[in-house]
Image: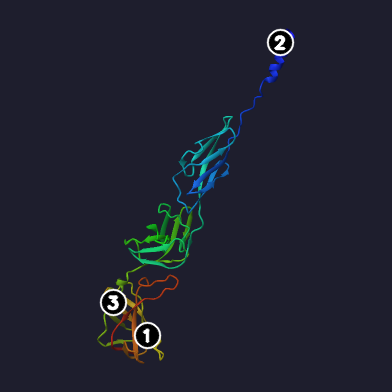
C-alpha cells in the first residue's frame, strides 16, 4: 500500500505546470494615424517621444484616433482607437504585465518645406488688397490664418502685421489676399515682407512690398501763361494744388532726332500744398527759351514727386514727374 501511495505522489509532481515570470516589456511598437481621406502616417520613436510628421498640405486636426500596438501582454492608456488631443505633450502610458509603467509623449512636427516667395513687386494703396497665387508666388504656406501671419518690415526693422485671408479661385487655384489697412500707422513706402507659417519663417532680402499713394493724389501744376524772367542762381515758383513730397525738377529739350536731352536740374528750395520753389543753377545758360516749344529754343519742365504713386517697381525705381504746361517765354538772365 505504501508503494502505491509513493507512486501516485511522484506522478502528481510530474504533472505540475511550469510557472513563468510576468512579461516586463512596456514599449509602443507602432502608432499610426489616418490623415486626410486615405493617407496613413506612422509615428517614429525616440526615447520617450512619439514623433508624428504631419504634412503641411493637410489641415492639422484638433483630435486624432491612433491605432497603437504595444509589447506582448502590455496595455496602453488611452487605449488604441481612443480619441485624443493631437498636440505635442499628449501622454500615453504603457503598463507591462509585470506592472512596470513607461510614459510616452506625443511630439507633433509639421513636415513643411521652406517658404518660397517669388521676388517680384507687390504693391497697392492704403486700404487696397493684393492677391497672390499660393502655387506660384508665395508657396508652402499653411493655409490657415491662425497658423500663418504676414508682416511688413520698415527700414528700422519695425514689423507691422497685415491681415490676410485664404481662398480658392474658380479654377481651383489657391490664393492669399493681403489686405492693407487704411490707418495712420501704415505709411506709404517700400517694405520687406516677413511670413511666419507654422514652423517656417521667411524674410525677403529686399523691400519688395510697396504701399502707394492713390493715382488721384497726383499734384496738379497750374499752366504758366505769363512770361517768366529769372536770374541765374535765383528762384522760380510754380503754383498748383495737392503738392506733397516734392523733390527736384528737371529742364529738358529735344535734339535733332526728337530725343529728350537734359538741360538742367533745379534744386528744391521749399514747398507748400499750393506752391513749390526751385533754384535756377548758376550754370544754366542765359537766354530766352520757349516753354512748351519743340524748336531749338524750346524747353520743357517737369517737377519730380514721390516715387510711390502710379507704377512702382522695387528693382528699378522710375522717377515720377508732373508736367509744367505753358506756351510762353522763359528767360534766364546772367548773374
Measuring from the top left, give residue 24's x and y in whole percent: 61, 32
Residue topped by disc 3: 220
Q: SS for tag 2?
A: helix
Can see residue 314? yes
- The residue nearer to you, when weighing 49 against 203, is 49
Give the quarter of the figure containing the N terminus. top right
What is the spatial separation of the Cα atoms under label 2 and label 3, in whole angstroms?
Answer: 127 Å
Q: Quadrant of residue 331?
A: bottom left
59 is higher (above) or lower (below) than 274: above
Q: Earlier in the sequence, mark 1 or mark 3?
A: 3
Q: Residues within 10 Å of mark 3 (few under 14, many from 20)?
A: some
- The residue nearer to you, when weighing 148 against 144, is 144
Measuring from the top left, give residue 307's x and y in whole percent: 37, 72
Residue topped by disc 1: 252
Q: SS for tag 3?
A: strand
Is the Cβ of the residue at disc 1 closer than 8 Å to that at disc 2? no
The residue depicted at 42 percent of the width and 56 percent of the height is 149
Can see residue 188? no
Residue topped by disc 2: 5
- The residue nearer to you, when weighing 66 against 94, is 66
Q: Earlier in the sequence, mark 2 or mark 3?
A: 2
The residue depicted at 54 percent of the width and 39 percent of the height is 68
The number of callouts visible is 3
Amino acid at each position: 500500500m505504501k508503494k502505491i501511495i509513493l507512486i501516485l505522489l511522484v506522478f502528481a509532481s510530474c504533472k505540475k505546470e511550469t510557472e513563468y515570470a510576468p512579461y516586463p516589456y512596456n514599449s509602443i511598437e507602432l502608432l499610426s494615424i489616418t490623415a486626410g481621406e486615405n493617407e496613413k502616417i506612422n509615428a517614429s520613436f525616440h526615447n520617450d517621444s512619439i514623433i508624428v510628421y504631419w504634412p503641411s498640405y493637410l489641415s492639422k486636426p484638433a483630435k486624432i484616433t491612433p491605432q497603437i500596438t504595444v509589447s506582448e501582454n502590455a496595455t496602453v492608456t488611452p487605449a488604441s482607437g481612443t480619441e485624443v488631443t493631437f498636440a505635442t505633450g499628449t501622454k500615453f502610458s504603457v503598463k507591462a504585465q509585470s506592472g512596470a509603467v513607461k510614459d510616452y509623449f506625443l511630439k507633433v512636427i509639421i513636415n513643411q518645406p521652406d517658404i518660397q516667395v517669388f521676388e517680384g513687386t507687390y504693391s497697392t494703396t492704403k486700404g487696397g488688397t493684393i492677391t497672390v497665387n499660393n502655387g506660384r508666388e508665395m508657396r508652402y504656406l499653411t493655409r490657415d490664418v491662425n497658423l500663418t501671419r504676414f508682416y511688413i518690415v520698415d527700414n528700422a526693422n519695425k514689423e507691422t502685421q497685415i491681415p490676410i485671408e485664404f481662398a480658392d479661385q474658380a479654377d481651383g487655384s489657391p490664393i492669399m489676399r493681403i489686405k492693407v489697412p487704411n490707418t495712420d500707422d501704415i505709411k506709404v513706402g517700400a517694405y520687406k515682407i516677413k511670413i511666419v507659417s507654422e514652423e517656417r519663417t521667411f524674410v525677403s532680402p529686399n523691400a519688395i512690398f510697396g504701399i502707394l499713394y492713390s493715382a488721384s493724389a497726383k499734384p496738379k501744376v497750374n499752366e504758366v501763361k505769363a512770361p517768366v524772367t529769372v536770374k541765374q542762381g535765383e528762384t522760380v515758383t510754380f503754383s498748383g494744388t495737392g503738392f506733397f513730397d516734392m523733390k527736384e525738377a528737371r529742364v529738358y529739350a529735344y535734339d535733332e532726332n526728337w530725343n529728350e536731352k537734359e538741360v538742367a536740374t533745379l534744386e528744391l528750395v521749399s514747398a507748400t500744398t499750393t506752391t513749390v520753389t526751385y533754384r535756377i543753377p548758376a550754370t544754366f545758360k542765359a537766354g530766352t527759351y520757349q516753354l512748351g516749344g519743340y524748336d531749338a529754343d524750346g524747353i520743357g519742365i517737369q517737377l519730380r514727386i514721390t516715387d510711390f504713386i502710379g507704377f512702382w517697381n522695387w528693382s528699378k525705381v522710375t522717377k515720377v514727374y508732373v508736367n509744367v504746361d505753358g506756351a510762353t517765354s522763359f528767360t534766364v538772365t546772367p548773374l
